[in-house]
Image: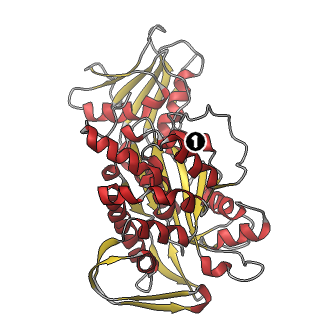
Amino acid sequence: MSMPLVGPMKEESKRRRRKAGRVLLVVAAVLAAAGVVSAGWLGSTLYGFFSSVQQVPPDPQPQEQPGVVADRPINILVLGVDAGAGAGEPPAPQRSDTIMVVNVNPATGRVGLLSIPRDTRVEIPGRPEPEKIAHAHAYGQAEGGPGAGARRVAETVENFLGIQIDYFVEVDFDAFRALVDAVGGVEVCIDKPMHYTARSQNLRIDLQPGCQTLDGDKALQYVRYRQDGDIFRIQRQQQFLKALVDKVLSMQGVLKLPQLASTLGRQVTTDMPTSRMLGLVALLPKFDPSALEMGILPGRPGYLDGLSYWLVEPEEARREAMKILAGIDVEANAQVRLEVLNGNGRRGAASSAADLLRGYGFQVVTVGNAGRFDFQETTVLVRPGDTDVGERLRQVLDPAAASVRVETTADLPEGVDARIVVGQDFTGTATGSAAGSAATGAAPHTREG
């Protein structure tokens, strides 16, 4: 199986990160990432925090053992809602101000974060024409009960990017302010004056250039400023996230974290079961905030019918989602031609493995039977000098097989770059939400019996 991305740590560092993990789940919800995959709680405080989180009934899902996280990656939709739009009695539907998808791979220790500009033009389920993705939350919220807004955004993202959203985490801006204030503020360097007022959103931004420590209110102004465009705002959000995580992990920040638990919990809404939260929090040994990969959905600004949008090519968006969220370079994988052989005798085993590999963009040219059916371990055979290809294939197959071997051979047919022999260890269940939609292409030659 794949090794964790983090190396050995001093015990003092481990203890510090375990303490920091108490609220890093909320850091993830607030700014979108590292906390979801950080450390464990002390028992009573941990359950106190999770019991205060506002949970809504999830969509029907397979039962999980409490505190256990399956090896397959999961995608978490993280939303920050436009609090100003929800003012009034009764509260008006809220648009999503920040939209991010976080992919957590428990097997490899990898975390990917993809920011989706709020002006991205997409098809929203139930709407006759494409609109800005920020509107999806308000439409769902207006038509349904608790969590309906987030679920509508999740459905929109699933259709648009060809991925599965497993859970959502939604926060209001008060949680962000509280977190920043609790750690004593975060230092940033502002490169220009930032001024903006929107009475309808109860928003006033007034920041001066220079390096300074921002309290919660000014930090919220900083990450919400978008007069220079949503892409620059997202870049500031991601930079601020890194600085905030560093501050939280500092000893000064750790000493101030316990006071946050119940306060932040009340400002977080999710459909993630407590058992799943506990399992994620327990995964610290495999995760390192510095290994977090961040990206922004590629596109270009443009106008349609007098409205400004972030315009995205769907196929390019899906490729970028696979690359950032799951570390899959579809274009590079498409150059690798595979022969997939059944080496365990179970009917359909090679076809199942081939489908998995196509989902990662690999070109499967042949599916068939091996010369024998007694392979215990799934084996990847590559030519000498192509071991990097073998390692990429091992990484893909690892969640679906207990022990993947990579070997070199000069006995590969012309037109084949690697041979995969499916062993008894192959379960046929793989990475689910890690991969996007399967790559398209010509059907391979099949002779599996």
The image quarter containing residue 275 is: top right
The residue shown at (32%, 49%) is 291
**Residue 126: percent from left, percent from top:** 75, 66
**Mark 1 belongs to which amino acid?**
Arg
The residue shown at (72%, 83%) is 88
Q: Is residue 415 above or below residue 244?
A: above
In the depicted view, which residue is nearer to us: 27 or 52?
A: 52
| Visible residue check, residue 442 | no
**Residue 11: percent from left, percent from top:** 27, 38
The image quarter containing residue 447 is: top right
Left or right of residue 352, residue 149 in this image = right
In the depicted view, which residue is nearer to us: 218 or 64?
A: 218
**Residue 182: percent from left, percent from top:** 42, 66
- The residue singled out by tag 1 in the image is 276
Q: Is residue 380 above or below residue 146?
A: above
Which coloring applies here?
secondary structure
Q: Is residue 176 above or below residue 91?
A: above
